[in-house]
Amino acid sequence: MTDCIFCKIIEKEIPSYPVYEDDMVYAFLDITQTTKGHTLVIPKKHVTDIFEYDEKLASDVFTRIPKIARAIEQAFPDMVGLNMVNNNKEAAYQSVFHSHVHLIPRYGKEDDFS
Ligand code: 5GP
Ligand code: ZN
């Protein structure tokens, strides 16, 4: 999709900080670091939201998430937990319409993100 910001990030037309990449998915730091290490995981295929996934795409994305979570944990060993968030459609606070999963590391009481 030519006017999709995340497709442009995949194509490296817009810079991003990579966390993990393979043929099917790209994971990169969110420009807004809700907490340190806040990462977005996106399928390389443009789909708007979870309602456009088939089983294969769901498997491609979600089976990689544990590996990506461990990569974040290695980079930020002081994390003590992690929220996985996926917003679908405007009413659910989706703001970029290329499906993505937020991985938000938690650092205990001091991270003041609730
Ligand atoms: P949503 O609100 O759709 O669940 O999340 C979209 C996320 O994309 C937001 O957390 C926002 O900070 C992030 N975002 C928007 N534009 C960019 C960008 O150009 N680069 C990066 N790395 N993140 C972005
Ligand atoms: Zn896209």
Image (cartoon, rainbow, N blue to C red):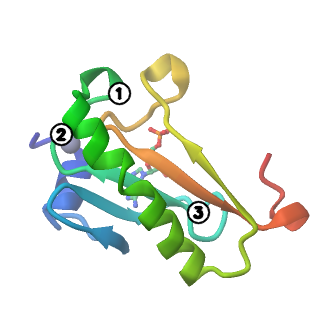
Separation (CA) of disc 2 from disc 1: 11 Å
Does mark 1 have its CB less than 8 Å from ligand 1?
Answer: no
Q: Secondary structure at mark 3?
A: loop
Task: Give the residue number, with chain letter if any, for mark 2.
Answer: 46
Q: For residue 43, say whether it is visible.
A: yes
Residue 98 appears in the picture as rendered: no
If the image is split into quadrants, where does the N terminus sit?
A: top left
The label shown at residue 33 is 3
Corner quadrant of residue 49:
top left
Using the image, determine if residue 10 lies above or below residue 58: below
Residue 68, x across and y down, in percent: 44, 65
Disc 2 residue type (three-letter): His
Looking at the image, tell me whether mark 3 or mark 2 is earlier in sequence order. 3
The picture places residue 3, in percent across and down from the top left corner, at 16, 41
The answer to whether mark 2 is within 8 Å of ligand 2 is yes
Q: Alpha carbon of mark 3 to alpha carbon of mark 1: how far?
A: 23 Å
Residue that mark 1 sits on: 50
* Label 1: which secondary element: helix
When asked about the image quadrant of residue 79, the answer is bottom right
Secondary structure beneath dot 2 equals loop
Q: As drawn, is 63 to the left or to the right of 72?
A: left
Displayed quadrant of residue 13: bottom left
Q: Nearer the viewer, mark 3 or mark 1?
A: 1
Q: In the drawing, does residue 75 fall left or right of residue 68?
A: right
Q: Nearer the viewer, residue 77 or 91?
A: 77
